[in-house]
Image (spheres, helix red, strand yellow):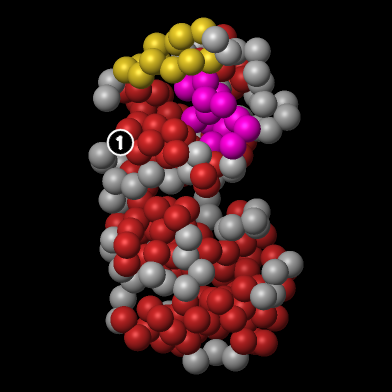
Amino acid sequence: MNSIVMLASDIHVTVDAARFRRSLLRWGRANRRSFPWRETDDPFRILVAEVLLQRSRGVTVAKVYDRLFSRWPDAQHLARARVDSIGSVIRPLGLTSRAAKLRDLAISVAERGDVPDSLEGLLELPSVGRYAAGATLAVAFNKHSAVVDGVTARVYRRYFGLPTEMAPVSDKELWSLVTDVTPKRSVREWNWGVLDLAATVCLPKIPRCSACPLEAERAWASSTDRS
């Protein structure tokens, strides 16, 4: 799908999906942030990172991530860890209740022998929701997969002029659009690019529009709803 007609504040706007992909991928490669889970191809470590990143900032998760895997380098080791020991490591995230969930996740992967490489298989794992499953498919396996949450939704909604009232997890129109515009290749880099743009440029209250590679093309520029 190379062009999409969206409705932005009662104005029909035709946006070029192919240009959107090119511009964002180019910007993402030049402005990529560095995180330890972006430097590995280990599916289990990537999956754990995606679980930890839910409701936690990347810079905080990075410190926890390194400590976690220096003590328990894989699913087999983490599956045998004590819950309170895991809790002490992830305490900086403020959600020590995730310790038991992490161990349950490790046990499930260890029993299987690997991390599933399908959406259905990932969703069967404990504590793995739609976003973590999709992100793991994109990053660990470089498979075409829609990935959107409350942060990255800003990029898609502002560019394509989508409504902002509905929670992203239940916004079927948003998920359908993200599925359509996500490239078939370079899915890993695409996912990182959208995240990095949302975190550094497409900010919630005061976006840095002059620094945005999509500024001239986005539907949001024609919209009065700047949420």
In this image, 129 relative to 112: left or right? right
The residue closer to the viewer here, 40 or 182, is: 182
Q: Which residue is mark 1?
A: 183
Tell me which amino acid carries mark 1.
Answer: Pro
Please state the horizontal and vertical placement of residue 128, each as a whole percent of the image. Answer: 47, 65
Q: Quadrant of the C terminus?
A: top right
Q: Looking at the rendering, in which quadrant would you find the N terminus?
A: top left
Examine the rendering and report whether any part of residue 202 can be seen.
yes
Q: Is residue 164 magenta?
A: yes
Magenta-colored stretch includes residue 142: no
Residue at the image position 61 percent from the left and 17 percent from the top = 210
Q: Is residue 143 left or right of residue 195?
A: left
Disc 1 crowd rating (10 Å Cα; few below 14, some 14-19, many 20+) is many
Q: Residue at x 52, y 25 (%)?
A: 162
What residue is rendered at 60% in x and 30% in y?
A: 164
Is 158 drawn above or below residue 168 in the view shown?
A: above
Residue 68 at x, y percent in the picture: 57, 76
Residue 202 screen position, x and y as percent: 60, 30
Task: Check the image and report above or below for 117 versus 74.
Answer: above
Is there any visible trace of residue 19 in the rendered image?
no
Q: Is residue 72 left or right of residue 150?
A: left
User: How many numbered circles does the render carry?
Assistant: 1
Which region shows up in magenta? 151-166
Q: Position of residue 158 (x, y in %)?
A: 55, 24
The residue located at (65%, 18%) in the rendering is 225
Q: Nearer the viewer, residue 214 or 205?
A: 205
Circle 1 SS class: loop
Q: Quadrant of residue 9?
A: top right
| Left or right position of 7 against 181 | right
